Image (spheres, rainbow, N blue to C red):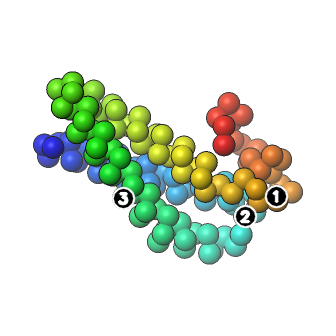
């Protein structure tokens, strides 16, 4: 993988990890899940680094395979962005705790969450 591909994967993975952590924190805060300070520390020191490692592995493999198949760095870069968006969505589905009883969130979804995105 050339250096530009490595930099693309690291940048996209870091962005996906931070976006996942911020979005998950907002969902937990809006639905009163747990204690805010404990959730923030868990997100900062456990979830975000783990999401970064997983996203970096996924985007790296996708970048490399698409680069080898198509030969285009642009197509490979676009595929890593699509993979990172998928990682963000999967993280929200896995960790938003949909079975947590929340009186402030009907159907365990915050009021600002778009209805057309399943969670």
Residue 33 - label: 2
Give SS at disc 3.
Answer: helix
Query: In the rendered view, would you say 13 is above or below 62?
Result: below
Q: In which quarter of the image is residue 32?
A: bottom right
Determine whether the residue tagged by mark 2 lies in a helix, strand or loop.
loop
Give left or right: position of 101 versus 95. right
Q: Which of marks 3 and 2 is nearer the N terminus?
A: 2
Q: Nearer the viewer, residue 40 or 118?
A: 118
Q: How many circles with numbers are drawn on the protein?
A: 3
Which is in the foreground here, disc 1 or disc 3?
3
Q: Which residue lies furthest to the right in this view?
A: 103
What is the quadrant of residue 80 in the picture?
A: top left
Residue at 58% x, 69% y: name it: 40
Quadrant where the C terminus sits is top right
Identify the mark at residue 102; answer none if there is no mark: 1
Q: Name the residue under label 3.
A: 53
Q: Which of marks 2 and 1 is nearer the N terminus?
A: 2
In the shown orientation, is residue 50 left or right of residue 115? left
């Amino acid at each position: 993988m050339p250096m530009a591909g490595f930099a693309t994967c690291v940048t996209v993975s870091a962005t996906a990890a931070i976006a996942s952590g911020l979005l998950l924190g907002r969902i937990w805060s809006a639905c009163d899940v747990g204690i805010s300070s404990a959730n923030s520390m868990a997100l900062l020191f456990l979830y975000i680094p783990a999401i970064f490692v997983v996203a970096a592995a996924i985007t790296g493999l996708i970048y490399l395979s698409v680069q080898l198949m198509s030969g285009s760095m642009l197509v490979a870069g676009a595929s890593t962005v699509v993979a990172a968006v998928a990682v963000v969505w999967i993280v929200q589905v896995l960790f938003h705790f949909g079975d947590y009883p929340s009186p402030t969130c009907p159907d365990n979804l915050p009021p600002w969450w778009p209805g057309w995105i399943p969670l």
